[in-house]
Image (spheres, rainbow, N blue to C red):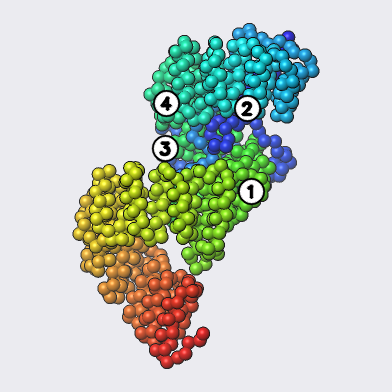
């Protein structure tokens, strides 16, 4: 008997693990185990370069404080405790730097490969089983041969199968010890089939279902994912305890069914069960999911009354609940007062900051961990790297606006974190490696991203998605699609997010295909997209509305509007995102009538509309010059207060202008208290489109006087007005002001207008200079007009050059041949065939 008890205690000790719901849908239960890598490989990486971690972190102090606000001290309410937190990154120790790394994950609306719950230490199996043993319900020894097989079940899933098969061969009820050991292994390997077979054996041969065994059966089924089966079994137990009830609550929370977890808690209260510490963990997580801060606070008070708030996993759950519900001050105070000694609490606090978009505070806390002498676990590295990815996204937006120097800072921080992870042997953990890949990709260092991807011996689906997304985000869509193919050949099955990224890659390539130097035509891309669509249809993801929305948009960008309509029509109840995607697709394909018809259908089906819906319909009104619908939509915008959005207001102004309702457009502009540049541009364009040069130029001057700063769009409108009115001199002066005074870079549209102006004046010398700058990147309308001007002025040499540009853009277009033939005929020459 002593041997059996010792074996039980040994097995119970094996189930202390870190559980995190942070990982995406495919990762539900992660044990806290470090991936074993070659020490020699790590040493080689560590020897490559050295970087001062503290110095690099202090270098970006100003950058983070600018984007994230003040340091971590501002958020803490306890003055004594807050002194222990440093400002953003002081001096630190030196870490060896791994000089290459790996790419990026998603970033957009989906996001990151982590969800938004807190990390916690959960030792439910160990604690529950220990509690059972303490009740005195001890199991007894079984025969030596079968006992060895049963206890070996925890070593490998094949051993579990053997133990269950052996159990089925025994046509008599077995002792509780036997069932308990096998059920333990079922929990470890998520063996639902095996657990059900054990349950069937218990029922078939009338084994005595003690309170201990009943609780553990419920917990096993719940942990293996059969929550409904566990619930039904729970209702049949003669004397259910807090253990089985808490197990059900935990399973419901893990599945995201917070309301069901709360119902179980109500049942517990009706049965006068006293909650234990793990009950509070599940209860707090349920309130975290539904963002019920008030209920969470009441639970905190209850936990204080029975004295469980000092238990680490309860304290961690409280921090997570407060953080998820947006109460950062309470989370920080609780952390400082009760939980600072627990490394998992630090990790939970890191996750809270990430969830709330506080990247600066995340890195500050990571730095503080080092100062406290604490070494982060793999999740600590993951959250710190996520913070770098968040900052890199912001810096990329700044770089698009003309500032790219700060992006280098994030790369250096990622490299320093990489070096730290190598030192602590976490760099090749699949989750840390994927986070490194993501961060390097967000920073745009795809070479390091690729190297990191190649270095990972273990790759899960999230890792593949991260690398595919890295290529897509940084404009290397061809590589993204090739990697998708490689992933499939490697036996990795794509899931929803994989298809979303692959579809987006095709869409981006379709946009590039409109350029003269596009490497793929839309016809080729359509074939690729159809092949991806076929892959999508044979998977369980085929009913995913998220992936279908991405597929619809990509079909539309490839010009396949009928296929896009088929995808939309396949859903009987499409969500608002899918409706808007279809509206946008119609607008892109210049099908304004269908846009308006779809909007009317949305109203008939009482679909909720948002500002994106309204903007799409207004664009449809602009194209079809439908004043009635335009006024109707404008009334709806005012009624729903969407007009408070400057972007929507600018679209309203643009729509009225296109419908020749310039007075209404001007009235809408005048109603805006503080119009932005887009609103000014829309009003200027309306006046220019109506041929009212004086009004357009007056608005343009008022824009400059308002200190807004004219942009490329405003100058496009002014140049267009000059072109329509024949004010060539004013147009040239405006163009020179754009370049010299406002330091704006002309684009192809500006050059096209200038070509039109110079062609009207017969100034072909300046036209030749412009053509050298644009390198033939005009549009067909420009080339047609210029060919006509060449015919008028008899400029055959320039006509030949422009004719070549037109053929490069659309080789099968007949109009350039007709125009060129007329030019030769006018000059009395014969055109070569």
Looking at the picture, how far across and down is residue 196, in whole percent?
A: 63, 24
Residue visible at 36% across and 62% down?
Answer: 712
**Can see residue 814?**
yes
Task: Work out whether mark 4 precedes mark 1 in sequence or the reverse, and give the earlier one.
Answer: 4
> Label 1, on which residue?
488
Query: In front here: 635 or 538?
Result: 538
Q: CA distance from mark 1 to mark 3?
A: 46 Å
Q: Which residue is mark 2?
A: 192
Left or right: 742 in relation to 13:
left
Residue situated furthest top in the rendering: 136
Instruction: Name the outermost residue toward the right.
Output: 145
Closer to viewer: mark 1 or mark 2: 2
Nearest to N terminus: mark 2 or mark 3: 3
Asked if the residue at tag 3 contacts the one at tag 1, i.e. Cβ–Cβ closer than 8 Å, the answer is: no
Q: Nearer the viewer, mark 2 or mark 3?
A: 2
Residue found at x 57% / y 28%: 225
- Per the model, the C-alpha gap separating discs 2 and 4 is 40 Å
Q: Position of residue 662 (x, y in %)?
A: 22, 61
Return the x and y of residue 682 as percentages of the image width and height.
Answer: 29, 59
Name the residue that disc number 3 marks: 70
Which residue is at 34% across, 65% downward?
716
């Amino acid at each position: 008997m002593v041997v059996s008890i010792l074996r039980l205690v040994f097995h119970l000790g094996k189930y202390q693990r870190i559980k995190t719901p942070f990982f995406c849908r495919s990762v539900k239960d992660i044990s806290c185990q470090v991936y074993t890598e070659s020490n020699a490989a790590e040493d080689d990486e560590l020897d490559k370069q050295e970087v001062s971690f503290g110095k690099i972190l202090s270098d970006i102090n100003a950058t983070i404080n600018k984007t994230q606000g003040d340091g971590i001290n501002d958020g803490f309410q306890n003055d004594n405790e807050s002194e222990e937190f440093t400002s953003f990154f002081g001096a630190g120790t030196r870490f060896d730097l791994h000089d290459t790394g790996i790419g990026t994950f998603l970033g957009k609306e989906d996001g990151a490969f982590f969800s938004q719950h807190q990390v916690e230490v959960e030792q439910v199996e160990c604690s529950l089983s220990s509690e059972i043993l303490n009740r005195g319900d001890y199991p007894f020894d079984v025969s030596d041969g079968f006992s060895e097989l049963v206890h070996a079940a925890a070593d490998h899933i094949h051993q579990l199968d053997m133990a269950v098969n052996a159990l089925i061969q025994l046509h008599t009820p077995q002792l509780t010890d036997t069932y308990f050991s096998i059920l333990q292994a079922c929990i470890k390997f998520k063996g639902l089939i095996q657990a059900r077979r054990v349950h069937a054996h218990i029922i078939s041969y009338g084994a005595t279902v003690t309170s201990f065994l009943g609780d553990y059966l419920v917990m096993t089924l719940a942990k293996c994912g059969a929550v409904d089966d566990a619930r039904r079994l729970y209702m049949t137990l003669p004397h259910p305890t807090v253990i089985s009830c808490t197990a059900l609550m935990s399973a419901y929370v893990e599945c995201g069914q917070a309301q069901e977890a709360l119902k179980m808690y109500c049942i517990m209260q009706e049965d006068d069960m006293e909650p234990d510490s793990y009950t509070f963990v599940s209860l707090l997580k349920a309130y975290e999911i539904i963002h019920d801060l008030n209920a969470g606070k009441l639970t905190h008070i209850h936990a204080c009354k029975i004295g469980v708030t000092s238990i680490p996993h309860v304290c961690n759950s409280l921090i997570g609940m407060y953080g998820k519900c947006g109460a950062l001050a309470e989370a920080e105070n609780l952390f400082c007062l009760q939980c600072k000694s627990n490394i998992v609490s630090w990790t939970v606090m890191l996750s809270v900051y990430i969830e709330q978009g506080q990247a600066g505070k995340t890195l500050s806390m990571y730095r503080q961990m080092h100062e406290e002498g604490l070494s982060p676990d793999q999740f600590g590295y993951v959250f710190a790297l996520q913070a770098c990815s968040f900052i890199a996204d912001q810096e990329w937006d700044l770089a698009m606006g003309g500032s790219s120097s700060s992006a280098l800072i994030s790369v250096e921080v990622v490299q320093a974190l990489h070096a730290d992870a190598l030192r602590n042997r976490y760099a090749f953990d699949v989750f840390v490696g994927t986070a490194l890949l993501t961060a390097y990709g967000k920073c745009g260092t795809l070479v390091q991203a690729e190297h990191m991807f190649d270095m990972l011996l273990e790759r899960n689906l999230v890792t593949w998605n991260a690398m595919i997304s890295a290529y897509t985000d940084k404009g290397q869509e061809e590589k993204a699609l090739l990697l998708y193919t490689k992933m499939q050949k490697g036996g990795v099955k794509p899931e929803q997010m994989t298809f979303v990224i692959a579809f987006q890659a095709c869409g981006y390539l379709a946009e590039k295909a409109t350029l003269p130097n596009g490497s793929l035509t839309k016809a080729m891309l359509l074939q690729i997209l159809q092949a991806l669509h076929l892959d999508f249809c044979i998977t369980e993801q085929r009913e995913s509305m998220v992936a279908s929305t991405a597929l619809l948009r990509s079909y539309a960008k490839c010009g396949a509007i009928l296929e896009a309509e088929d995808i939309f029509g396949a859903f009987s109840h499409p969500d608002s995102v899918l409706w808007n995607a279809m509206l946008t697709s119609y607008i892109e394909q210049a099908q304004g009538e269908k846009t308006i018809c779809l909007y009317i259908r949305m109203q008939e089906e009482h679909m909720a509309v948002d500002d994106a819906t309204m903007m799409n319909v207004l664009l449809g009104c602009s194209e079809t010059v439908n004043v009635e619908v335009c006024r109707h939509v404008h009334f709806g915008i005012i009624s729903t207060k969407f007009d408070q959005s400057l972007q929507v207001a600018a679209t309203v102004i643009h729509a009225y202008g296109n419908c020749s309702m310039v007075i209404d457009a001007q009235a809408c502009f005048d109603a805006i208290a503080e119009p932005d540049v887009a609103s000014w541009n829309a009003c200027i364009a309306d006046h220019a489109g109506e041929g009212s040069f004086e009004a357009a130029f007056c608005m343009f001057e008022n824009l400059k006087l308002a200190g807004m700063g004219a942009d490329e769009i405003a100058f496009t409108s002014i140049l267009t007005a000059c072109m329509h009115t024949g004010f060539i001199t004013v147009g040239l002066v405006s163009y020179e002001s754009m370049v010299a005074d406002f330091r704006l870079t002309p684009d192809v549209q500006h050059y096209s207008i200038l070509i039109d102006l110079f062609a009207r004046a017969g100034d072909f010398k300046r036209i030749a200079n412009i053509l050298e700058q644009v390198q033939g990147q005009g549009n067909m309308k420009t080339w047609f007009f210029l060919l006509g001007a060449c015919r008028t002025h008899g400029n055959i040499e320039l006509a030949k050059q422009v004719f070549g540009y037109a053929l490069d853009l659309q080789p099968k277009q007949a109009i350039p041949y007709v125009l060129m033939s007329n030019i030769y005929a006018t000059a009395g020459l014969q055109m070569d065939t």
